[in-house]
Amino acid sequence: MAAKIQHQLFFPHPPKAVWEFLTNAELMELWLMKSDFKPIEGHEFKFVSKPVPQLDFDGIVYCKVLEIVPFKNLSYSWKLGPGDGTINVDSIVRWELIEKDNGTELFLVHGDFTVLENTGVFEAMNKGWLDNINKIAERLNTQQHG
């Protein structure tokens, strides 16, 4: 399936600061969703938010950490559905951090969809990821200047 979400954003902060927002469950809740994430390969976790029935989403995203290279790469599976035991989105989220002289380039690729029966939620995720990455930037800037 060719569907893919890609976003890129530059942060004037070191990779370690950006990484914390990608791997610390308390910080993840500030920009994404509440979760029981742990930065351990093989760890299964859930993101939990409000259900969106019109998008056939029960509010739970089922995930598993696939790869973790501190301050550089993070990937996890991303599965969701309407709550009846079926999955209508099955995909992989990949984060890559590249250290630059004056900060960090962050790349997000949400792809490898083996199931994408829910195009409405795909559009919502595309916009949502960009909004959420910008929330990381806002929080980092607030920490730095606050």
Image: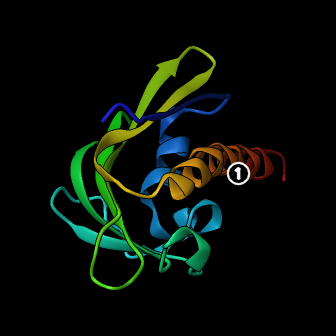
Q: Is residue 55 above or below residue 83?
A: above
Q: Position of residue 113 (x, y in %)?
A: 31, 45
Which residue is at a point 63% across and 33% down the rendered structure image? 13
The residue indicated by pointer 1 is 135
Front one among 32 and 97: 32
Which residue is at a point 70% across and 51% down the rendered structure image? 135
Q: Residue furthest left?
A: 42
Which residue is at a point 42% across and 78% down the rendered structure image? 82
Q: Quadrant of the C terminus?
A: bottom right
Query: How many residues crowd mark 1 within 10 Å: few (<14), some (14–19), many (20+)?
Result: some
Amino acid at dot 1: Lys
Q: Is residue 105 above or below residue 68?
A: above
Which residue is at a point 56% across and 81% down the rendered structure image? 51
Q: Position of residue 5 (x, y in %)?
A: 49, 36
Query: In the picture provided, is 142 more to the left or to the right than 14?
Result: right
Q: Quadrant of the N terminus?
A: top left
Task: Give the number of marks.
Answer: 1
Front one among 144 and 88: 88
Query: In the picture provided, is 68 more to the left or to the right than 25?
Result: left
Q: Position of residue 105 (x, y in %)?
A: 54, 24
Query: In the picture provided, is 94 more to the left or to the right than 65?
Result: right
Query: In the picture provided, is 40 more to the left or to the right than 142?
Result: left
Is residue 70 among what the camera can see?
Answer: no
Is residue 141 among what the camera can see?
Answer: yes
Label 1: which secondary element: helix
